[in-house]
Amino acid sequence: MDQRLAGSPPTGFLRRRSAMPVWADLVWRVALVFGLIGLVLLIHWLGRAGLHDNFDKTISFIDILYFTTVTVTTVGYGDIVPVSPEARLFEAILVTPIRLFVWLIFLGTAYHLFFRNILYRWRMARIQADLHNHIVVTGFGTSGAEAVRELLARGTDPRAIVVVEMSEKALGEAEALGCNILCGDSTRDRTLKDVAIHRARSMIVSAGRDDTSILITLTARHLAARLPISIVVRNEDNELPARQAGATTVINPTSFAGLLLAGSTSGRHIADYMADLAASGGRVKLNERLARPDEIGAPLSAITTGIGLRIHRGDQTIGSREEGAQRLQSGDLVIEITEGDAPG
């Protein structure tokens, strides 16, 4: 899965919308070809004394037009040939490069208008077939970019991340990190189907606007009913609508910053510790996992992989000191603090 999605299929092939419309680009190419043919036609006409017609021994304007078009598009048929040194030198030095350039224009136009789309659709289909258990990130602004970098720092394969964005600059940054990228509108069903949302492991929504993020969540939820969706909202009033739209996790950066600031008033190390827990490179980190078979029936406090904080049992959240935490059950999700990667 080392290719890239719609915005830029393979590595280093970031597609950028041209400022020139397709029809104008085609007209410009055609005009360039006719301009080159016209230049050769003019020089052939002025130097017609150096040409010889093997058919009727005379050189008319029709003969010059015929000879020019045949010479520019092919190597000629031999019925009209240059005989003077000047005419042959002109054919070798000027007409041959023009012939090659015209063919490059023809091939480039055919690729640009037809073959590229066929190749792109084929590559797109291959990438989509490989997308399984991936993470979809919609929006690559400050929060989305930080989330991707944190995922990479935690060991996530960049090829298992798909970034959906409208900004070419943001797509270029995501591609530089090794992620799959798609240039598209995440509020549209087609865009999310293109990234195989129904086969994704999880989704991060950070569109920059709460209303857009909520609409993306609604779109994703109806396409993937069980997909874990984490959404960033800036306004506290939008936290409830985000959950009602189908978000499983709602994060408000402003509220989190407030928690850090408030914690710092009680002790100058509290905010540092909370930031340490959230980052991948700290001395400690939070971990969520299923209860292991050998832990079933034991209390949460007896786990040996870290410090047990709470249990998620279905829709129920159980604290470490509550009655339900005295006996772990199969299917329990354990939230624990474990040793981080940084030296202690």
Image (cartoon, rainbow, N blue to C red):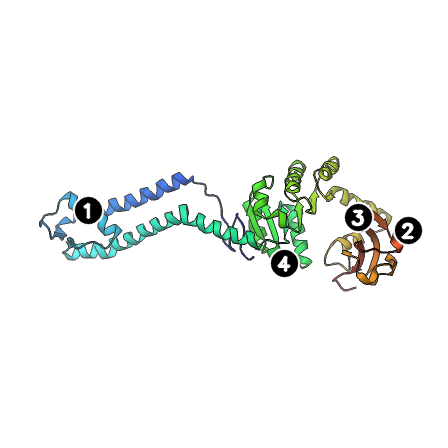
Tags 2 and 1 touching, CB below 8 Å: no
230 horizontally vs 124: left or right: right
Q: How much space separates mark 4 and mark 1, taking CA atoms?
A: 60 Å
Secondary-structure class at tag 1: helix
Q: Which of marks 1 and 3 is nearer the N terminus?
A: 1
Position of 267 relative to 219 (above/below): below
Q: Which of marks 2 and 1 is nearer the N terminus?
A: 1
Secondary-structure class at tag 3: loop
Identified at 68% across, 44% down, the residue is: 225
Q: How much space separates mark 4 and mark 2, taking CA atoms?
A: 39 Å
Percent x, y for residue 27? 35, 40
- Closer to the camera in the image, 64 or 265: 64
Identified at 28% across, 52% down, the residue is: 98
Residue matched to label 4 = 157
Q: How much space separates mark 1 and mark 3, taking CA atoms?
A: 82 Å
What's the amino acid at mark 1? Tyr
Residue matched to label 2 = 323
Residue matched to label 3 = 314
Percent x, y for residue 147? 67, 50
Quarter residue 244 falls in: top right
